[in-house]
Amino acid sequence: MEFIQSQEIQETPKPELSNGRANKLDPQDRAFHDWYRFVLSFPPHLVRDYIEKFNLTHKSVILDPFCGTGTTLVEAKLAKMRAIGLEGNPFPHLASSVKTDWNLDVDNFSKQARQIAEKAIAILKSQGIDDNLSFKEDKDLRLKTLSPEVEKLILANSISPLPLHKTLILVECLKSYENTPFYRHALVALGNALVFKISNLHFGPEVGVKNLKSDVPVISNWLLEIDKMTNDLQKVSGKSFPDTKVHLADARSFDMIEPNSVDAVITSPPYPNEKDYTRTTRLESVLLGFINNKEELRELKRRLVRSNTRGIYKGDDDDQWVSNFPEIQRIAEAIENRRIELGKDSGFEKLYAKATKLYFGGMAKHLADLRKVLRPGAQLAYVVGDQASYLRVMIRTGQILGDIAKSLGYELVNIDLFRTRLATATKEQLREEVVILKWRG
């Protein structure tokens, strides 16, 4: 693969939104999107902008190969377009599937959710626990806990003992409805309640623990999420929308998608930094049974583009895809030289340079295999951000991805400025951009 030197690309700022508002979820966009959403997800209005710019119609097929919690998929469905998503992390995959599944009997869903709630409340009351009243733990009460192996998978103190007990009771009650049409929706509702109301998690933007809650209502908070879902589903009841397909899959391979079938890609891949994206969804993934041990966690990470050192494994060789890219090799060398200069010698720090090459290699592999499913004239939008978390060595992600795409036969149409954001490491403003590509076939 030969390196193609980048050319000056015109940048198109978005003046209609302030920088601070650019990545926010507008109140009018909360329907479906707010069922479960990454804190740093890109906003629905950005998807709508590129649906319009690409002149897509109801006949178009949109692909999001890093679909996360389904922002692109929901917007495509609302626009009555067919959409396909790929996601390697099982709980966000479930969330994307649920957020685009609007074929539920809403009244039955609400009714059965309340039956489950009543069952859970009765069990708790038999133990002397009122879910809606603050409770001082009885030393004689045996609370449900996680096994030591499972507990090691989540952040320490991410959920307090009593809310954990009540959550596990509700999960047990839910399991008897596992074969019902609404079961997956009920799980996503609980996942959202766990993250934002029941747990001690705090996002700023990294996930951490803050303000430990000795007790918090679990059943009622879950029902509030159920009501949010049913209210949104009632608004689309009786209307026709195309089906959306969401695959639990690695974005570096597209064997599950029909060749020559995709008109547009609107997506946001992971950025090359030390953010372990699986930590963001770890609590709900573990408590709801999607990750049960370290091996399952490792298998999950193997499905993801290597964007951080905690996802690197022996035998990873995506870096061979970018061995002839001087700029990537220069950045990797600069990171390694800075590491040596600063005397940083932990196992993870020694992998910073490798992680950078694996990331761009994985994205090259992704773009290479993607070509077979694109129709001639397909248009692509990749939301990415510059990074400086590897010992403050600047990585111009958007420009490098544009160069990789050109070497694979794509046309680099433009790099639009989406917004700037403050880097925690350097206290500098970093650019978030949308790399616009075209596949001529």
Image: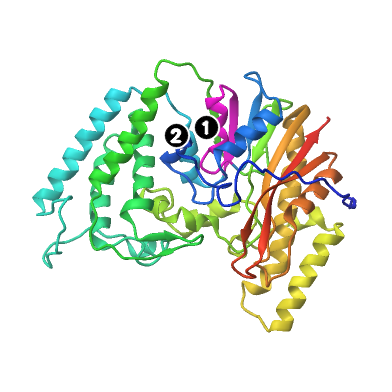
Q: Residues within 10 Å of mark 1 (few under 14, many from 20)?
A: many
Residue 104 in picture, x, y percent from top left: 37, 24
Q: Which mark is residue 32?
A: 2
The quarter of the image holding the C terminus is top right
The span shown in magenta is 67-87
Question: Which residue is painted at 84% across and 44% down in the image?
Answer: 406
Q: How many marks?
A: 2
Q: Is residue 429 visible?
A: yes
Q: Is residue 319 left or right of residue 20?
A: right
Q: CA distance from mark 2 to mark 1?
A: 7 Å
Tell me which amino acid carries mark 1.
Answer: Val
Q: Inspect the magenta stretch and tell me whether residue 68 lies in it.
A: yes
**SS for dot 1:** helix
Q: Which mark is residue 74?
A: 1
Tell me which amino acid carries mark 2.
Answer: Phe
Q: How is the image coloured?
A: rainbow
Q: Is residue 357 left or right of residue 58?
A: right
Q: Nearer the viewer, residue 305 or 134?
A: 134
Question: Which residue is painted at 69% across and 71% down in the image?
Answer: 392
Q: Residues within 10 Å of mark 2 (few under 14, many from 20)?
A: many
Residue 247 picture quarter: top right
- In the rendered structure, are the residues bearing label 2 and label 1 in contact, judged by CB atoms less than 8 Å apart? yes
Q: Is residue 257 visible?
A: no
**SS for dot 2:** loop
Residue 64 in picture, x, y percent from top left: 62, 37
Residue 263 picture quarter: top right
